Image (tube, rainbow, N blue to C red):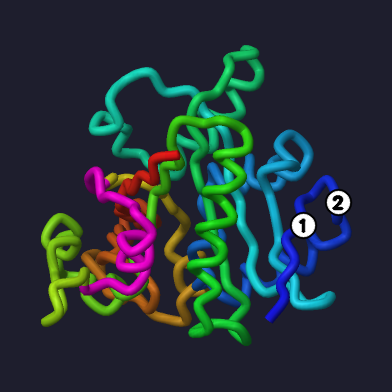
Amino acid sequence: MNYKLVTTNERRDLIKAGDNIVEAVYPEFMLHDAVANEWFFQLYNDFPEYQYWLLDGEEIVGIGNSIPIFWKDKLENLPEEGWDWAIVKGFKDKEKNIKPNLLCALSITINPKYQGKGISTKMIRSMVEIGKIRKFESLIIPVRPTLKKDHPLIEMEKYILWKREDGQLFDPWLRVHEKLGGKIIKVCSEAMDIRGSVQDWKNWTGMDFPESGSYKIDGALKLIEIDLEKDEGIYIEPNVWVVHEL
């Protein structure tokens, strides 16, 4: 099919429709990261050329969000804070007029109607091309492995080593990156920090939390921690730093 890629510079009118798809794809609690809520929508104003949509006619097939950053250290030393760190770093670098040398992917979301059709490959390739055009050294991505949610008790460090019988990586999202030349750098164990009251977590998950402790919830990559005395639920999500050399 003939898909068309457009950036925010060309189609600001797609922001709301794209956001509706993101809300439909991700579990409710993932929409309550404090850092994301503060900074994410500013991407469309401050970095419009790095936010894009893949279109089938007028229908959104996929949404890509990224931010340029400056990083002078080894990639092996990228921060544990992953996603939360990257978006703040990009905005702070811009404020200080620091010239970026890396492009960091923040989100690639596929319209459920188009999932399973190889769109993820097209979306990654599109982001790689955006990075090449801007002459960045690398595309770095705090990847959220697709099937880790089915294995929340397994440490991410172990999960990323899992292989299929054919020798390829077990996780389909990591596997797509691998096929396109992406290399796993390391786990970023504190990529997103999501907190809320116990009632917030009840609203987000539809679950009850009768006592303090660790709970498995749908869509989470690890257990969440509930503290009734402090009236707080905390979920620190691990992701995986992946690099595509440009």
Q: Secondary structure at mark 2?
A: loop
**Image point (66%, 18%), residue name:** 95
Q: Quadrant of the C terminus?
A: top left
Q: Is residue 110 left or right of residue 217?
A: right
Residue 193 or residue 186, whichever sits in front = 186
Q: Which mark is residue 10?
A: 2
- Residue 206 at x, y percent in the picture: 47, 81
Q: Which mark is residue 191?
A: none
- Kind of residue sitting beneath label 1: Val
The residue under label 1 is 6
Q: Is residue 140 magenta?
A: no
Q: Quadrant of the N terminus?
A: bottom right
As drawn, 130 above or below 180: above
Q: Are marks 1 and 2 in contact (CB under 8 Å)?
A: yes
Badge 1, how many Cα within 10 Å: few under 14, some, many 20+? some
Give the magenta-colored segment's residue range: 170-187
**Image point (46%, 58%), residue name:** 197
**Image point (48%, 23%), residue name:** 70
- Residue 228 at x, y percent in the picture: 32, 61
Q: Is residue 101 visible?
A: yes
Quarter holding residue 67: top right
